Amino acid sequence: MSSKSNLFRRGIIPISGCGLQKLENHLFVSCNLFGQIWQLVWNWICVHLVDPSNIVDHFHQFGTSSGYAESMCSFMYLIWFASSWLIWKERNDRLFRGKKNSLVQLLENVKLLSFWWFKIKIVVFHYSFHNWLQNLFLCEYCLICASFC
């Protein structure tokens, strides 16, 4: 018996509900709820693309097809990983803890988490969080993002 079946049987998770499907494409890309987060992230970073329906294509498009220089790909991937981590965490919080954040709260968490991850990676990063929110790609350290690869 699978772990998911055991959780159903014990009444820990409902039989139906968003995020319970095994397909990561659903949870991370096509879910009516969590898929909206990507649109908010796109708007924040001023990129306007149509999200692919496949998670692998979504990942590659996010990093390489956003219209920024190739050296920015790692920087974009960092934002993608922060977004994906928070989607996964939010799914689990909703299923197991009955805790829900709004889409706006999730976007703010993406901004904060990506800022801290970048700040940890680049030790001499002195860009303020306010500037990060307002002028993400004007940051002088974004030019050295190729060091992530």
Image: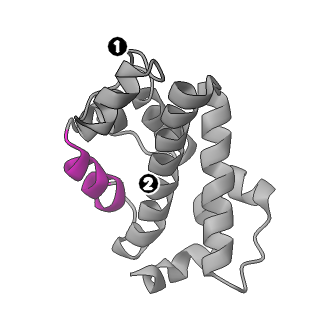
Q: Pick whichever, 14 or 26, lies toward us.
A: 14
Q: Pick whichever, 88 or 139, lies toward us.
A: 88
Residue 22 horizontal/vertical position (percent): 24, 34
Q: Main secondary structure of the magenta part?
A: helix
Task: Name the residue at 27% across, 40% down.
Answer: 24
Res. 130 image quadrant: bottom right
Task: Name the residue at 36% across, 20% down.
Answer: 9
Mark nearer the N terminus (2 vs 1): 1
Residue 140 horizontal/vertical position (percent): 64, 77
Mark 2, residue position: 80
Which stretch did the figure color magenta? 54-65
Residue 104 vs residue 88: left or right? right
Residue 61 horizontal/vertical position (percent): 27, 53
Residue 138 horizontal/vertical position (percent): 63, 65
Check the picture and name the quadrant holding the N terminus: top left
User: Mark 2, mark 1: which one is toward the viewer?
Assistant: 1
Tag shown at residue 37: none
Amino acid identity at mark 2: Trp
Element type at mark 1: loop
Residue 28 vs residue 25: left or right? right
Residue 124 is one of the magenta-drawn residues: no
Check the picture and name the quadrant holding the C terminus: bottom left
Q: Gap in Å between the C-alphas at discs 2 and 1?
A: 27 Å
Amino acid identity at mark 1: Ser
Mark 1, residue position: 16
Task: Name the residue at 65% across, 26% down.
Answer: 99
Task: Name the residue at 57% across, 43% down.
Answer: 44
Residue 89 vs residue 139: left or right? left
Element type at mark 2: helix
Task: Tell me whether circle 2 and circle 1 mark residues in contact (CB < 8 Å).
Answer: no
Residue 57 is one of the magenta-drawn residues: yes
